Amino acid sequence: MINEKRAWWKEAVVYQVYPRSFADSNGDGIGDLNGITAHLDYLKALGVDVIWCSPFFASPNDDNGYDISDYRAIMPEFGTMEDFDRMLEGVHARGMKLVMDLVANHSSDEHRWFIESRKSKDSPYRDYYIWRDGRDGREPNNWGSVFSGSAWQYDETAGQYYLHLFTKKQPDLNWANPKVRDEIFDMMTWWCEKGIDGFRMDVIGMIGKENFDDGPMAPGALYGDFGPSCMHTETTHKYLREMRKRVLDKYDLLTVGEAGGGPEDAIRYSNIDESELNMTFYFEHTDGLCDHNELGKWSDHGSPLNEVRAVMNRWQTALQGKAWGTMHMSNHDQPRQVSRFGNDSPLWRVKSAKMLGTLLHMMRGTPYVYQGEELGMTNIYFTELAQYKDVEVFNAWKQWVDSGRVHPQDMLRWLAKIARDNARTPMQWNTSPNAGFTTGMPWMPVNPNYLSVNAESEVNDPDSVFNYYKKLIALRHTYDVIVYGEFVPLLEDDPSVYAYRRVLDGDTLTVMCNWTDRNAPCALSDDSQGEELISNYPDHKPGFLFPYEARVMLKRK
Ligand code: GLC
Ligand code: CA
């Protein structure tokens, strides 16, 4: 039996808000902080404990706020510092907590530090970023950026190349410079003193660059992989331990690293020895499954049960007794989970959205709900390039389609399935024009299915995805076995059913999820598993699960 230490952030459920698309309070078509404040009662009703807000800081929005030009100012489109203070007060008044996004691997090229840095080699800010001379008239090494193209950009004024692992408007900060660490830690302390309750740390596994050697090239790849030099290095762990001592340990925070990597990395980032972070996200069940060729995430590879289950079970068991984890299938970088892993046809959308919610919320790790997931929101299925907004899409198009390597129809099909914009369409609040998101012209089109998929009708419908999520969240708050129980995989080769147990002090929770649109034989589906805690079907058939049926049974000692 595993004896877990109790912690509020293990018992909590987190809700992710993407401010630009959540709620617009002033009719300019862009979601804002006052819009969030206006919907705090909705989040309280859902029952979540913590709100993680994607970045709301000053930014030229090359990557929707993940390119920050002033870490201590609010993006004017989102409101003012007073609006932030009111939002934080509103969150706390309802007994919830607020986690901010810490985007400190890189800043915007419009940050004062970078503007100074590029001016001359003697600038006191020069070493805030990573500048290198070219090699034989070309980039300093072969690294490719996450968003296509080289990871290096030549700067005329500076007379050197600078490193950007993301877009060229996101230069990487040089964490090796102690002044940079001082700046970041001071800024974090400043926000903690304002009262925020934690940090989600953007691509934190990349902060410790250990060398600048050429990276390995996958067959057919255009650029080398910076991973071996930049990802999950000893240096990164050293910086995180320093951050822990100098900032995090002084407050009672939730800290979650967007780190990725394998379980062995997570065990270091979020070890129970509490030397670094509380928990980390992993992406092997999302990005990892399709990432089989030189095109990376752009592929027809879907999410078959056997692959998803193998990854998720491996993570569940590997972290047990060693580290704390997280549970999610969607966020602002992923398509909608019901479209990707479930079935978003009108016939099965509600059932399969509930099934996926059950699978995630009964597992070990803190669950993260991405805005609209609790309504079963779906992909938007754009058909033309011009409909997209995301810089990742345009860079990938340039690299693969414009160069003649990929047929436009193939790319459009992949985009419709996995582009990040699928998760960034406005939140669907009600049946009024633009789903009640804005009275103006929304920055992204609203999914036309908002007449049937929206918060107002779901809150009032006892059978909705919303009310099912509400129940899932309440169950986690009621039964220790859901938070602290040992994870035991079941039926690991079953072609249709994902099943597992959680065990604590003699209590046994059995979770069964039919991943298909057909009846599935299931020997566990009978009354011997105890009392039913939740299911997405009113009736059951012994020995079978209905299409997308989810059932959770509890047997007490
Ligand atoms: C993270 C963010 C993503 C952003 C990237 C660069 O992966 O979640 O939205 O584009 O980092 O900051
Ligand atoms: Ca607005």
Image (cartoon, rainbow, N blue to C red):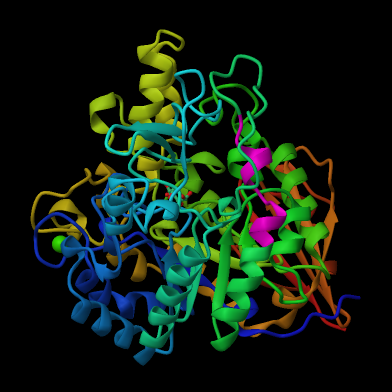
Could you say where residue 226 lies in the image, as x and y percent from the top left?
60, 36
Could you say where residue 325 lies in the image, as x and y percent from the top left?
68, 64
Q: Is residue 1 above or below residue 413?
A: below
State yes or no: residue 230 in magenta.
yes
Count of all numbered marks drawn on residues in the image: 0
Main secondary structure along the magenta-highlighted residues: helix
Q: Is residue 185 above or below residue 546?
A: below
Quarter in which the N terminus is drawn: bottom right
Could you say where residue 156 lies in the image, as x and y percent from the top left?
28, 32
- Residue 412 in view in this figure: no
Q: Residue at x 53, y 65 (%)?
A: 178
Along the line of sight, which residue is nearer the eye, 303 or 111? 111
- Relative side of 144 to 237, left or right: left
Toward the top, the furthest residue is 404
Q: Residue at x 43, y 89 (%)?
A: 95
- Residue 6 in view in this figure: yes
- Relative side of 408 to 513, left or right: left
State yes or no: residue 101 in magenta.
no
Q: For residue 90, which quarter of the picture? A: bottom left
Could you say where residue 53 lies in the image, as x and y percent from the top left?
38, 67
Q: Is residue 554 above or below residue 516?
A: below
Along the line of sight, which residue is nearer the eye, 181 or 420? 181
Along the line of sight, which residue is nearer the eye, 225 or 381? 225
Toward the right, the furthest residue is 1
Quarter in which the C terminus is drawn: bottom right
Q: For residue 465, which quarter of the picture? A: bottom left
Along the line of sight, which residue is nearer the eye, 216 or 12? 216
Toward the front, the furthest residue is 122
Query: Which span of residues is magenta-colored?
Result: 225-237
